[in-house]
Amino acid sequence: MYQSYFVANLRISLGVEVRAGEEQAASHGLPGMSRILERLPGEN
């Protein structure tokens, strides 16, 4: 299962993670999204 993170209006992919098949709910992707957002500079 691929968990992908997009900014829809900008058509930008922030990242993709490979997850186990039983971890397909959005709640399993939240930690990955939090890590991506924390790495962005503050002005973004």
Image: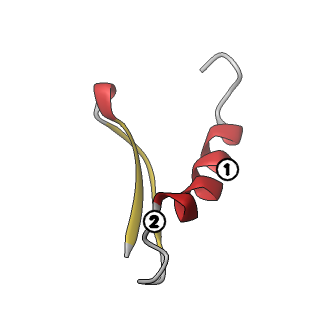
In the visual, does 21 lie left or right of 11? Answer: right
Q: Amino acid at mark 1?
A: Arg
Q: Could you tell me residue 43's position as x and y percent?
A: 66, 16
As rendered, which of 27 and 8 lies closer to the eye? 27
Question: In percent of the image, x 67 and y 50: which residue is there?
Answer: 35
**Res. 35 mark:** 1
Write down the quadrant of residue 12 in the picture.
top left
Residue 13 screen position, x and y as percent: 37, 44
Q: Residue at x 68, y 27 (%)?
A: 41
Left or right position of 34 against 9? right
Quarter of the figure with the N terminus: bottom left
Mark number displayed over residue 16: none
Circle 2: residue type: Ala
Q: Secondary structure at mark 2?
A: loop
Q: Residues within 10 Å of mark 1 (few under 14, many from 20)?
A: few
Q: Secondary structure at mark 1?
A: helix
Query: Whole-percent x and y of residue 3?
Result: 42, 63
Circle number at residue 25: 2
Across and down, in percent, residue 40 comes to: 64, 33
Residue closer to the observer: 1 or 26: 26
Horizontal arrangement in the rendering, residue 31 relative to residue 28 (left or right): right
* Quadrant showing the C terminus: top right
Going from the N terminus, do you reach mark 1 or mark 2 first? 2
Seen in the picture, residue 8 relative to 5 is either above or below; the reply is: above
- Compared to residue 21, the image places residue 9 above or below, namely above
Residue drawn at point x = 31 percent, y = 33 percent: 8
Q: How is the image coloured?
A: secondary structure
The span from disc 1 to disc 2 (Cα, nearest Å) is 17 Å
The residue positioned farthest toward the bottom in the image shown: 21
Q: Is residue 15 above or below residue 8?
A: below
Pointer 1 with pointer 2, Cβ within 8 A: no
